[in-house]
Amino acid sequence: MSTHEDKGHIIPNSTLVAVWLALLVLTVITVAASRVDLGALNIWVALGIACSKSALVITFFMHMKYENWLFRLFLLIALVTLAVFIGFTFFDTLYRQPI
Amino acid sequence: MNQTASTTISRGFWDAPGGRKGIGAWIFSTDHKRIGLLYFYSTLAFFCVGVLLGLALRFELFQPGADFFTAQQYNSIFTLHGVVMIFLFIIPGIPAAFGNLVMPIQIGAEDVAFPRLNLLSWWLYMIGAIMALTSLFTGGGAPDTGWTFYVPFSVRTTTNVSLATLAVFIIGFSGILTGLNFLVTIHRLRAPGMTWWRIPLFTWALYATAWVQVLATPVLGITVLLIFAERVIGSGVFDPARGGDPVMYQHLFWIYSHPAVYIMILPGMGVITDIIPVFARKPVFGYKAIAISSLAIAGAGSVVWAHHMVTSGMSDIAVMIFSLLTFLVAIPSAIKVFNWVATLYKGSIQLDPPLLFALSFIVLFSIGGLTGLVLGSAATDVHVHDTYFVVGHFHFVMFGGTGFAFFAAMHYWLPKFYGRMYNKKAAVWGWALMTFGFLVLYMSMMIVGMEGMPRRYYDYLPKFTFWNQMSTIGSWFLAIGLLIVFVNIFRGLFKGEPVGSNPWGGATLEWQTPSPPPLENFEAEPVVTHGPYEYKKAGIL
């Protein structure tokens, strides 16, 4: 199995700048979305934007796109676990009886 | 027993102190065996503290009324009993002590992947432990919340909850680092020929446990920090008056603490799985099913947390979904139990002390598991919630399960690391008294719980007296059994007859190296050519 050290990768500046600009645009969308009340969709929009931003950072800035499949699998397991923890909590909070 | 004991034993890693003297050769060592023994003695010391606290609680409950303690003292003692037993003994007990001692040898490695990180894990554990014990004597007095630190009481109480939660936060880091270390070690440091389907099932169980430690423990860290923030800066996250949600605390706490139950039990199951085929003299039944069931328990066990919260006021939909999910965990657990029994079937059974503890494990864990279904089912849970039935149930799983597995591991593996054997007859007496005392102690709790006695009170109605007295008497038998086991095993390890490299006739790699093992575990790198339980291929049968 090839190791992490064998696979050094330099990302072109143009890609890094493009990702940075995308992050800035998403930040503007975050602020804008917080001023609109979408009801139950609020949480989905907020989490969607946050996931997109972190996906960009992890994929390009943290080089996950160029990593061994095993590391990508491990990251995926961690993210899916977190999503399940958050998602399953909504079985309670979305359906709670009014007091 | 295919090895003859030599009269002059090599002291192996004991003679390699790493250029340091005295205690420094231990507390600054990066050898996984020394760190394993550090963990072993630390966890054992805290176990003894926990036992004394438990005995004190049973003394108080021998008869109704206030006898030895005030209500406040009783609350502090059961909180400390829970915190010490859960965070300082059961969680690190098997994975950190026996995992460190045995796992690298079982996969043919010289050490863990990150030896310094391993030492740091022990230091963090000890720092957290000292902080937890310090919380007893400082601030507003010993915490009185129970080990769960439920809000709003944990935010309002004037006792020293802040220091205790910080201690738990630090101990959590220790577990995360150990889990990370084990994951990398199992992936990267296996000996040539040690394929995934040749890994011993104790190591498989540690692998599944390590994933839970890495993925779930950070949630505990966040949760206890939120309590700390709530107490110190009044953040209001759990305060409904300020838009917070107290039930959310219970979600966060159990998102970690239910998977933590599997951090506690999975390594114990791994110990039992390694012991049974050796003493049944036949290969384990359903190797792959047991390995996969460890992963399935880790996975399914991570999504059932809210079954602790049936009466908390959470939504009915959540009650039903988490109740259903809880039943799913029974499937991989039952796979293990059936496979253990099938391994024993038609075996040539040697009733040595490790197997006796393992057999007790199967019976006690099965009772604990089945009574868990009573609690997992929402319809029955509401009736027995917060009664002594729950206390009886989780002691069956945690002590009858993990605790007995810990003692099985002691009797199975410690002769390997000391090169000497204990007195087996005395060990059998200790086991018998422990098992008898255990059943009387905790069966009585389940009965009195079914009769309606609530948990966490220092007093009770006179009608509950008989079963409480039975329970307390059982605790004395258990304590005598423990005393016999400790005196016998430590006298044997330091003064017993020398043993050869393979006293039990095991086929896994730890039995193919001298007792005690040398500094880097093997005289030459092992090459694995057969599975861990193929005794004929290993030339043992």
Image: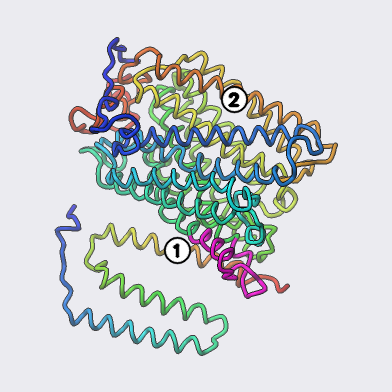
Label of residue B434 in the image: 2
Label of residue A82 in the image: 1
The spot of residue A72 in percent (x, y) is 30, 62
Q: Which region of the structure is painted magenta?
A: B222-249
Element on which disc 1 rests: helix
Label of residue B480 in the image: none
Q: In front here: B480 or B538?
A: B480
* Residue B197 in sight: yes
Element on which disc 2 rests: helix
Quadrant of the image occupied by residue B439: top right
Q: Residue at x 41, y 37 (%)?
A: B39
Q: Residue at x 21, y 66 (%)?
A: A66
Quadrant of the image occupied by residue B360: top right
Mark 1 crowdedness (10 Å alpha carbons): few <14, some 14-19, many ≥20: some
Q: In front here: B30 or B199?
A: B30
Q: In front here: B285 or B16?
A: B16
The amino acid on which the numbered mark 1 sits, given as a three-letter code, is Leu
Q: Residue at x 31, y 73 (%)?
A: A57
Q: Give the answer, above or below, for where B437 lies relative to B91.
A: above
The amino acid on which the numbered mark 2 sits, given as a three-letter code, is Met
> Label 1: chain?
A
Q: In which quarter of the image is the C terminus of chain B?
A: top left
**Side of A41 relative to B29 (left or right):** right
Q: Is residue B246 magenta?
A: yes
